[in-house]
Image (cartoon, rainbow, N blue to C red):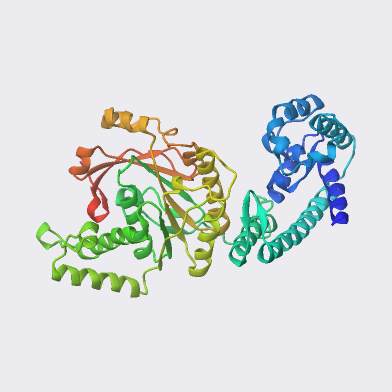
Amino acid sequence: MSELVDMSVAYEKIIFSRLLQKDEDVMLRRIELRDELNSADIFKNEYYVFYLMIDQQPRLKFDREYLKLFLSIHRPVLEKSPCIDMTSYTIGDADAYISFMDSCISVFDECCNTSVADDIFYLNIQKYKMLYVQRESIAILEDSAEIVSEGKKVKNRQLIGYKDMRNYANDRFSKLDKIVEKSKRNGSIAYGITNNDNEKEEQLKVLGGYGIEALDSKLKIYEGEMHSILAPAKGGKSRFVTQVIETCLTDYGQNCLMWSVENGQKGWEYLFRARHFNHIYNKTATDIYQKKIITDSDIKRNKLSPELQELEQSCWIAFQHNEQYGTLVNMDEDLLIDTFIDKIDEQVTKYDIKVICVDYLQLIGRGKSNISSKNELIAEAYKQMLQYLKHKKIAGIFPCQFKQTVVGNLSRASAEEMVNMELRDAAGETYEVIKTPDVNIALYASVADLRNGEMKLLSIPSRTMSTFEPIDLYADLGTSTFMSVVK
């Protein structure tokens, strides 16, 4: 193990010697580092500090004064970091952190004064990655053996036995996988005359729609996209995404995953069954007397007449056996930051899922993570989710809540004022709820509007969607049915 550690320090020095230079291309090399080795925890001691600096300020050309300031400001965090062995800087009664600062400055000077060619830099990134994976794999296996045999204390928690060992190993190896499995890149693209003129351009695939004519004409659900649906609390979010999932399953034949944290597995099943029944039996009805309307509450509380109950059960069975429909996977798991991607990926791989929905991601729990702030927890969940969707080329639908001040502003706004209302800061708890997704749309209705079956669909500026005028909706929450109307 000592030989591995010695080699890793040598690789670290070569890597950061190229990253701390002051030439114009340093930004590109720093991006490459974060792409290949996407966590500061991969590095140790002085190089851990350098990575943090680069991660926070990738465009900055650092000097000794900036390093001293960084070390002073971040002292409380760095002193407690497991990536820094502060005991190795202890000399007698002297302050170990002061010795560590001096060492950082000395290593920084060495890196700045060491010339490294680009090919050597990129080669050493790969060598360091391989060495890190080797070292971590051995450590995981050694820790796992200790847990299963005699027990081991990890982050103030005593782990012992097979179950704890398996959970520990799965968590550690999943983090290692993110380093080994670099996200796919396309390299450079030359736009102009080439020898590949006859090649067909690869287009993003449409995976679904919203089932709302006026919206579907402007917006589709494409692979790799993250769609955010904002609304007030109890404003119809769960029922709206129920229609979206049912549309993707039946109209587009996509396999879909629903993780309904708020309503629970069975609660959301009732929503879906009511939506599907009304979609099937009432889509061709021309007047009210032809319609057979049932709600999720009717199914849940067994309030259906024998005739309607038999029809509903037949409709539900027919849905499950219709080969033209996609497969529906309804999850019931704890939504935790350290495991939620792995749980989703397990189902995505097993059932070839193309569209997922988490209702809702703002309910994410801390699990074994060290993230203490709820806002940071949600922000991290959204960023991880976006990366996962892009990597897997699947689509995600994520309902979320408006912050309360926005609800108040909307309640006082006229229809004309809603057109130009600023909603880019409307998300509750963290800005990432709107910043991260590719598409943002919003639903709003007052209590009186909901009683009358009325709702507004509003657009929020997004990466992949042009803003549009508000769309008037007919909203039947009992059947999870939303349709555009012309006033």
**Visible in this render: residue 461?**
yes
Q: Quadrant of the C terminus?
A: top left
Give percent across and percent down for residue 420.
36, 30
322 w.r.t. 402: above or below: below
In front of the other: 183 or 69: 69
In front of the other: 255 or 266: 266
Q: Residue at x 19, y 72 (%)?
A: 310
Left or right position of 409 against 425: left
160 w.r.t. 307: above or below: above
Q: Residue at x 81, y 29 (%)?
A: 95
Give percent across and percent down for residue 216.
35, 51
Residue 200 image-quadrant placement? bottom right
In front of the other: 366 or 222: 366
1 w.r.t. 307: above or below: above
In front of the other: 380 or 283: 380
Residue 408 image-quadrant placement? top left
Left or right position of 318 against 11: left
**Visible in this render: residue 202?**
no
Q: Quadrant of the N terminus?
A: bottom right
Give percent across and percent down for residue 55.
69, 38
